[in-house]
Image (cartoon, helix red, strand yellow):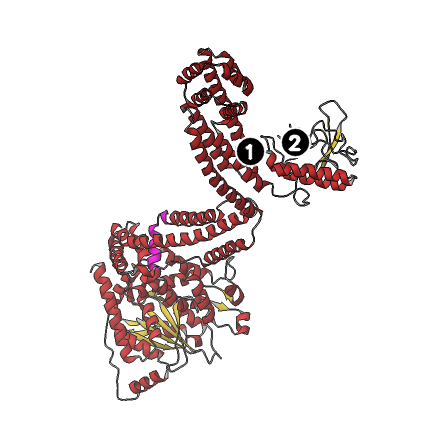
Amino acid sequence: MKELLRALRPVKKRIRRNRLLQGAAAGFAAGSFAALALLAAARFVPLEGKWLWAGAALAACVLLFAAGNAVRPVPAQEAAQAADACGLQERAVTALELAQLSLQGPAGELAKVQRQDACEHLRLLDIKAIRTQFPKRMLVSGCAALILCAGTMLLPGDGDRIAAERQALREKVAALSGQMDKAAGEDEERLGEKDKAELRKITEELKRDLDRSKDEADALVALDRAEKRMEQMRRKTAGETADQLADALRDAGLDRMAEALQSGDGAALQEALESADASALTKAAEGLSGEAADLARTLANGDLTAAELQAALEAMQGSGLQASQQALEAMKAALGMAGSQLKPGDQAGEGGTIGGASAGKNGAGGGAGKGSTNEDQGASASASSEGPVKGSEAPEYREGKYETIYDPEKAETLSRDVMTEQNRQGQDSVQIEAGPGRGRTDGDVPFGQVVGEYARTETRAAEQASLTREQKEWVDEYFRKLTDEE
Amino acid sequence: MNTNESITAFAERYEKIRREIAKEMIGQEDVVEHLLLAVIAGGNVLLEGVPGLGKTHLVRVLSKVLDLPFSRIQFTPDLMPADITGTNILVRTEEGNAFRFQAGPLFSSLVLADEINRATPKTQAALLEAMQEHSVTVAGETMKLPEPYFVLATQNPVEQEGTYPLPEAQLDRFLFKVLVPFPTLGELGDIMNLTIGQRTGDARKAADAGELMEMRETAKQVPIASSVQESALKLVLATHPDQADAPETTRKYLRFGASPRAAQAILSTARVRALEQGRYNVAYEDIRYVAPACLRHRLALNFAAVTEGKAMEEILRELVDTYVK
């Protein structure tokens, strides 16, 4: 039996090789269809690097199927049958069967002779005669699936567009992040260790959030968050600087100057400076470092006008993180411009439609936001078809910062609802009409993103409403100012 | 003699026998091959062919080569059973008159039953016992026939008038039915040279009865793989139209199928062929070779086959190709 099994080893090896190829062919077919399914889904669901994923699916299927098929043990019976099919005329199969019986006498002798004959023929067998049987249908269907995969290039869908936008966003953000890093580096030179770590943490988190952003809205939210933290840090740093210098001034007996410094009053500081002892000021500056020392030296130099003093105070307020904040503003501007590309008066696009007239009290936000806009300007309380305030002089418009402008309950919907919102200031209720929009409940939507849509919808409403030419011009003027400032 | 020597001797003797027969038989290799397979396997053969093809001569040459006594029986409608089995005759002895059994032509190792379909069923039945049991019963007394015992019967496919077709039961006792084809032009020329020219055949003895029996015993030991045996059995089952999984051809063209004797015939003769081919095991090729001869006289075509002109050979080829890979 051992002799026979040894003689069958090359056959088994050949069969395993054939199985590997057959498995690879089956994996090719399966992988092609998997890739096709992935690419078809990517038309509707954004998937970045879809071709890489499709390629990976194809490669993984080929490898898995090939390995899975080859790893399976080859039974001796199968090897014997494969060898017999190559002209051994059932020698191997018969020998295998006889080896499993305990034959005695002449039958046993004949079995032995037969086994030797089979082993001899197995040794002489040309292994290459055991051909690989490729599943032709699978290969053909796999090729057809690959052709269809290539065909998906001709039919881009929403998913492709969104994935491309995300990729573009990522590239833009990467470029802007480089500028951010440079600006943060400049600021770090002027900061203490603790503040450096804080600034580094803010920039790292900003980078992480930007990396995870799916669109401009997410990126702007991340920038807004970083900006707030940076502002908090700046205030804290400026306050600490002012306190440090004020303490030093008090220690030097310059209490009036210390109070003026802490209050931020340039004129009072000017007066205190004129009556202060320069040597005491210099002495106070000696124990200080950083921005406090800079300011103390500036004060000690003297010959500063009130305006200059005021400027110095303001510079102290904002100098620590100036470069980083400017970089943030630049990033916001760059992303905000990409997000709100449509100008006022443009009829295309989707967004919330607020009423038929210009914004009423708390009406501009679709009713569920925390924002306030153009309060107390005498605008009409009713957002229905009635016109706004009629008069001969233009109302005084005041800008507001919108924290949330879309109704979160209307996230991603296509319906238009009429809702009634109670006026928070106790006046009559306002009826507003809210339309489809990208509602959010997890944070603020930056003003730069929504102003374009807001302008567009309000201008459209103004066109449709019964307004005089003058009133319409007021509306146009208002939104032009808003968007120009962006 | 051990197994290895037996097998080696088998191949040598077989080749020698064939060579000797070829000295006096021109062509007909296939017929000779089947005849030898049947003789070694211990079975009887039904030869069918037109007169003058050398069927009698073949048996005569075979008897010479195998050194076996040979007898020829020309069957006629008036042939009685006693004419072939023998009979008790009254003889005068010193003690007085006594019956003595006079052996008939059946008492020979090689019996040629010429035109067996011309004999009456009663005479055919007498032959049947001899073929199957290798014995003859006369007046209540059973006498054994010599071993090896081999009946070669012939049939004329034409001139069926006044004949008694062999019943299925008797046909079933023939191991093979071999069709003797008409010789080719070249073979005819050789035959002429041999029979009416100056050239003479000179077949010599190649084996004797004892050696023949040894060859038979050796062949019985040849192993068959279960898959090969199963294919032969499936083939036999496929000839039965009443089987649930019978193929379309069988259902459409056959009236009835082969008995288990067909399976025995296929496997026993396949063993001989395997050894003759130099193998120590039976292969599918052996089954494919012997199956048609084993089956063609055991199956019956139905009316549909006759009207459509479907030949038995065609049906057999389809079945063998389907069930014996």
Residue at 52% across / 37% down in the picture? A331
Q: Position of residue A319 (x, y in %)?
A: 48, 27
Does A202 sit above or below residue B190?
above
Question: Which three-letter amino acid code belongs to the residue tagged 1?
Answer: Val
Q: Are marks 1 and 2 in contact (CB under 8 Å)?
A: no
Does B56 sit above or below residue A288?
below
Q: Which mark is residue A221?
A: 1
Q: Which mark is residue B126?
A: none
Q: Nearer the viewer, residue A45 or B85?
A: A45
Q: Earlier in the sequence, mark 1 or mark 2?
A: 1
Q: Is residue A407 visible?
A: yes
Q: Quadrant of the C terminus of chain A?
A: top right
Q: Position of residue A247 (x, y in %)?
A: 46, 14
Quadrant of the rendered image containing residue A281 = top left
Disc nearest the viewer among 1 and 2: 2
State how far apart marks 1 and 2 are (Cα): 20 Å
Label 1 neighbour load within 10 Å: few <14, some 14-19, many 20+: many
Q: Position of residue A458 (x, y in %)?
A: 70, 38
- Asked if badge 1 and badge 2 are on a common chain, one would say yes
Residue at 35% across / 74% down in the picture? B31
Q: What secondary structure do most residues of the magenta stretch adopt?
A: helix
Question: Which three-letter amino acid code belongs to the residue tagged 2?
Answer: Glu
Q: Chain of mark 1?
A: A
Does B173 sit above or below residue A361?
below
Which residue position is annotated with label 2? A399
